[in-house]
Image (spheres, rainbow, N blue to C red):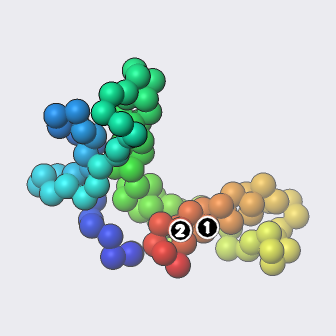
Amino acid sequence: MSNHTPGPWVAIESMGDFLIQTENGYTIGDVLGEGNSYSDEEERERWYNAHLIAAAPDMLEALEEAIKCGMVPSSSVKDGGAARHSRQVAVADMIRAAIAKATGN
């Protein structure tokens, strides 16, 4: 596991800002827009982005567990992968890349 602030995280709205907080209220980030007034579409986008960020620890844990329990093939496309499972191997590579990006590896 990486050294990020442990989840779960939640997205909340506070005085027009969209914050990402731990369950005990520690703010770990916010989703800012440009300027002081936003269209309805920009507000929705900021809200959805906050929720996506808040889900990051859960998604990382699920991806790591998928690898640990064998749901993700151990071979990779760059290693030749198993021809009959080429789509699964490609998705496994995507999962490993997402974990590496999330953990800074």
Amino acid carrying label 2: it is Lys
Mark 1 crowd level (few <14, some 14–19, many ≥20, 10 Å Cα):
few
**Pointer 2 residue:** 101
- Going by the picture, which residue comes out furthest to the right? 83
Q: Is residue 84 left or right of residue 58?
A: right
Viewer-nearest residue: 69 or 67: 67
Viewer-nearest residue: 32 or 23: 32
Q: Residue at x 30, y 33 (%)?
A: 36
Viewer-nearest residue: 40 or 70: 40
Q: Is residue 23 left or right of residue 54?
A: left
Mark 2 crowd level (few <14, some 14–19, many ≥20, 10 Å Cα):
few
The disc label shown at residue 20, or none = none
Viewer-nearest residue: 50 or 15: 15
User: Alpha-carbon distance for marks 1 and 2?
Assistant: 6 Å
Amino acid carrying label 1: it is Ala
Q: Residue at x 53, y 68 (%)?
A: 101
Q: Quadrant of residue 94?
A: bottom right
Q: Residue at x 41, y 22 (%)?
A: 39
Residues at discs 1 and 2 in contact (Cβ within 8 Å): yes
User: Could you tell me which quadrant the N terminus lies in?
Assistant: bottom left
**Disc 1 on helix, strand or loop?**
helix
**Pointer 1 residue:** 97
Locate residue 35, reporting x and y percent: 36, 36
**Disc 2 on helix, strand or loop?**
helix
Locate residue 25, reporting x and y percent: 13, 52
- Going by the picture, which residue comes out furthest to the top? 40
